[in-house]
Amino acid sequence: MDGVEFPKVTELAIPLFVAAILIELAVVKMGRGRGEFETRDTLTSLMMGTGNVVAGLLFGFISFGALMWVWQFRFLDAGLGAGVAIAAFLIDDLRYYWYHRIAHRVRWVWAEHINHHSSQHYNLSTALRQSWSGHFTGMFVLQVPLVLLGVHPALIAFVYGFNLLWQFWIHTETIGKMWWPVELVMNTPSHHRVHHATNPRYLDANYAGTLIIWDRMFGTFVEELEEDRPRYGIVKNLGTFNPFKVAFHEWIAMFSDAFSPGLTLRQRLGYLFMPPGWSHDGTRKGSDDLKAEFVRLHPAEAGKPGLPATRDILEPAE
């Protein structure tokens, strides 16, 4: 089984991605759909997508090679049947939820994921704004249990391709809320708009890949509200369309913080592994601080989905 190969779903879908982006662009320009395109922003997203493919070709052996090494220690051999593929897809979708949640709460992983959120526009081209450094974070470890249960790493990569394929089309404002059973179970454009938003109530929400049920189960689901339309980007926007700066700016900032003079080892590790916005002296604001600040300004919003409810956060800490 070590010579197992499957089609690379996302690479085969590239013509579909390009065609869909052109169709969405036409719909938006004709005023028949909601959304915005900015030429430099779109080109940056396309270059980020190209760089992601190149990085996969150059460095994909790191993650895949590590999983193939683990493969020799598997407890079972599940085979390559359709039932195994479906089970692997569902389990890996749960794995993706936790990877995505970690990526927003651990700066080491956020450093590679932040570029996906760096566009201040939300359209299908944004879906292609992908990491160049994901193979270096070590997050392949979340797939180790599936390999030990006998699912071949090539099959895991194959089913994950369909997860990414689903995630492509939900990066749009041209599709509003869908039929309620779909919204209940699946990740949709509405749910993912929330995830990309910087509005305080929407921060750190809706981490799902394909199934939104994981967010509903683990308490991270927030509904999109028409009265609080999503604003896109990151808390401190970059102000650049340079793809190299987009790809590596957070790595540079993170290591600069971690190796600043006069810090203790614990503080240095904090800059690497605490949530984004953490600082050793408390002078920066993370998502929890921004949510608390919003509630202090809008007390009537306290306790609503995505916002803290406890009264002890209403006064700034001394």
Image (cartoon, grey):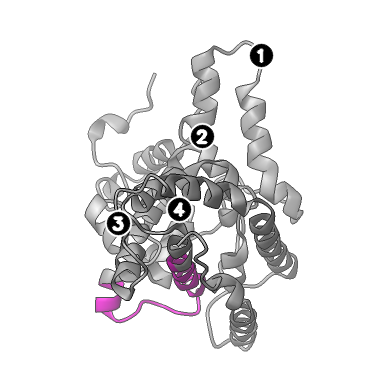
Front label number (3 vs 2): 3
User: What amino acid type is highlighted by mark number 2?
Assistant: Gly
Kindly report the distance in space between the C-alpha atoms of the residues bearing marks 4 and 3. 18 Å
| Image quarter hosting the C terminus | top left
Residue identified by numbered label 3: 215
User: The magenta stretch spans which residues?
Assistant: 159-184
**Which is more toward the observer, 2 or 246?**
2
Q: Measured from the top left, where is residue 311 in percent x and y?
A: 24, 34
The answer to whether the residue labelled 4 contacts the one labelled 3, judged by CB atoms less than 8 Å apart, is no
Residue sitting at x 37%, y 38%? 292
Kindly report the distance in space between the C-alpha atoms of the residues bearing marks 3 and 2. 23 Å
Judge the density around disc 3: few (<14), some (14-19), many (≥20) Cα neighbours within 10 Å. Answer: many
| Image quarter hosting the N terminus | bottom left
Q: Please, what secondary structure does the residue beneath circle 3 have? A: helix
Front label number (1 vs 2): 1
Kindly report the distance in space between the C-alpha atoms of the residues bearing marks 4 and 1. 34 Å
Q: Give the mark, 1 or 3, whose residue is nearer the N terminus.
A: 3
Residue identified by numbered label 4: 199
Residue identified by numbered label 1: 261
User: What amino acid type is highlighted by mark number 3?
Assistant: Asp
Q: Which mark is residue 193?
A: none
User: What amino acid type is highlighted by mark number 1?
Assistant: Pro
Judge the density around disc 4: few (<14), some (14-19), many (≥20) Cα neighbours within 10 Å. Answer: many
Residue 27 to residue 228: above or below: below
User: What amino acid type is highlighted by mark number 4?
Assistant: Asn
Kindly report the distance in space between the C-alpha atoms of the residues bearing marks 4 and 2. 16 Å
**Which is more toward the observer, 97 or 139?**
139
Judge the density around disc 2: few (<14), some (14-19), many (≥20) Cα neighbours within 10 Å. Answer: some
The answer to whether the residue labelled 1 contacts the one labelled 3, judged by CB atoms less than 8 Å apart, is no
Q: Give the mark, 4 or 1, whose residue is nearer the N terminus.
A: 4
Residue 170 colored magenta? yes
Q: Please, what secondary structure does the residue beneath circle 1 have? A: loop
